[in-house]
Image: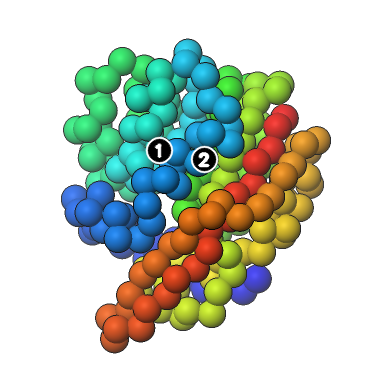
């Protein structure tokens, strides 16, 4: 993989679009992405979940709706403000600012951990996966969803992605290297779609990696 974009550019982009992110996201991928991710993790009411790179709460909303407590982590102050506005009064919600590669979550305190469309923005993907392993309880589950490797350069120049997607097996190998004894990867059966400023259109398959600690 070749590193493409800086952290500052990505953070600035998400600060700028936070107020309209919910509308933008609907054009990129369907709500079914989160429902399938939660089903893969076999979430149960009363569990404690971590939504890493939570944005404005795409996954957080569904997790709260299924009766889980949620720790939502994002490095964008504007995204955190949106999270607080939407969920701050909901029982079981907690929003935290922090680096996805050094999560502000205590070791061994999470039942299920999620990252949706986050890995391609992370400078060091194996570090994020290692943090999943650290914060999960024994027997805890992790589900990561992202898009497969592609050749659309405008994802990197206009959306400030750091990586042009991933091969699912490559990400699964990161989970095994982090210490997860049970790892599975596959197609989520969904796509991410976007259009460049010049009208080029991309449709990229979304994959999942599911792991148990």
Of pointers 1 and 2, the one earlier in the residue sequence:
2
Front position in the image: 108 or 200: 200
Q: Is residue 76 left or right of residue 185?
A: left
Front position in the image: 164 or 188: 188
Query: Mark 1 packing: few (<14 Cα in 10 Å), some, or many (20+)?
Result: many
Residue 196, x across and y down, in percent = 33, 78
Relative to 142, say whether 188 is above or below: below
Q: Which residue is mark 2?
A: 37
Quadrant occupied by the N terminus: bottom right
Q: Secondary structure at mark 1?
A: helix
Pair 1/2: label in front = 2
- The residue that appears at 72% across and 30% down in the rendered structure is 213
Residue 82, x across and y down, in percent = 23, 40
The reply to whether the C-beta atoms of the residues labelled 1 and 2 are less than 8 Å apart is yes
Front position in the image: 52 or 147: 147
Q: CA distance from mark 1 to mark 2?
A: 9 Å
- The residue that appears at 26% across and 28% down in the rendered structure is 87
Relative to 159, say whether 57 is above or below: above
Q: Secondary structure at mark 2?
A: helix
Q: Is residue 66 left or right of residue 85?
A: right
Residue 56, x across and y down, in percent = 30, 43
Relative to 103, say whether 166 is above or below: below
Q: Which residue is mark 1?
A: 59
Residue 35 in sight in this render: yes
- The residue that appears at 19% across and 50% down in the rendered structure is 19
Q: Is residue 23 left or right of residue 125?
A: left
Query: Mark 2 packing: few (<14 Cα in 10 Å), some, or many (20+)?
Result: many
Residue 31, x across and y down, in percent = 37, 46
- The disc at residue 9 is none
Q: Is residue 102 left or right of residue 95?
A: right
Relative to 157, say whether 120 is above or below: above
């Amino acid at each position: 993989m070749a590193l493409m974009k800086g952290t500052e550019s990505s953070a600035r982009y998400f600060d700028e679009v936070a107020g309209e992110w919910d509308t933008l996201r609907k054009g990129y991928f369907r709500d079914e992405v989160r429902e399938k991710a939660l089903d893969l993790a076999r979430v149960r009411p009363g569990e404690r979940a971590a939504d890493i790179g939570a944005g404005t709460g795409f996954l957080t909303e569904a997790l709260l709706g299924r009766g889980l407590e949620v720790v939502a982590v994002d490095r964008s102050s504007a995204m955190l403000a949106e999270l607080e506005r939407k969920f701050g009064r909901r029982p079981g919600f907690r929003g935290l600012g922090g680096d996805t590669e050094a999560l502000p979550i205590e070791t061994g305190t999470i039942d299920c951990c999620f990252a949706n469309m986050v890995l391609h923005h992370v400078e060091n993907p194996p570090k994020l996966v290692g943090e999943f392993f650290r914060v999960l309880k024994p027997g805890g589950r992790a589900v990561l969803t992202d898009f497969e490797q592609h050749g659309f350069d405008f994802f990197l120049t206009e959306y400030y992605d750091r990586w042009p997607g991933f091969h699912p097996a490559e990400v699964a190998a990161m989970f095994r290297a982090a210490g997860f004894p049970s790892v599975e990867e596959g197609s989520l059966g969904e796509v991410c779609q976007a259009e460049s400023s010049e009208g080029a259109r991309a449709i990229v398959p979304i994959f999942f990696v599911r792991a148990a600690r």
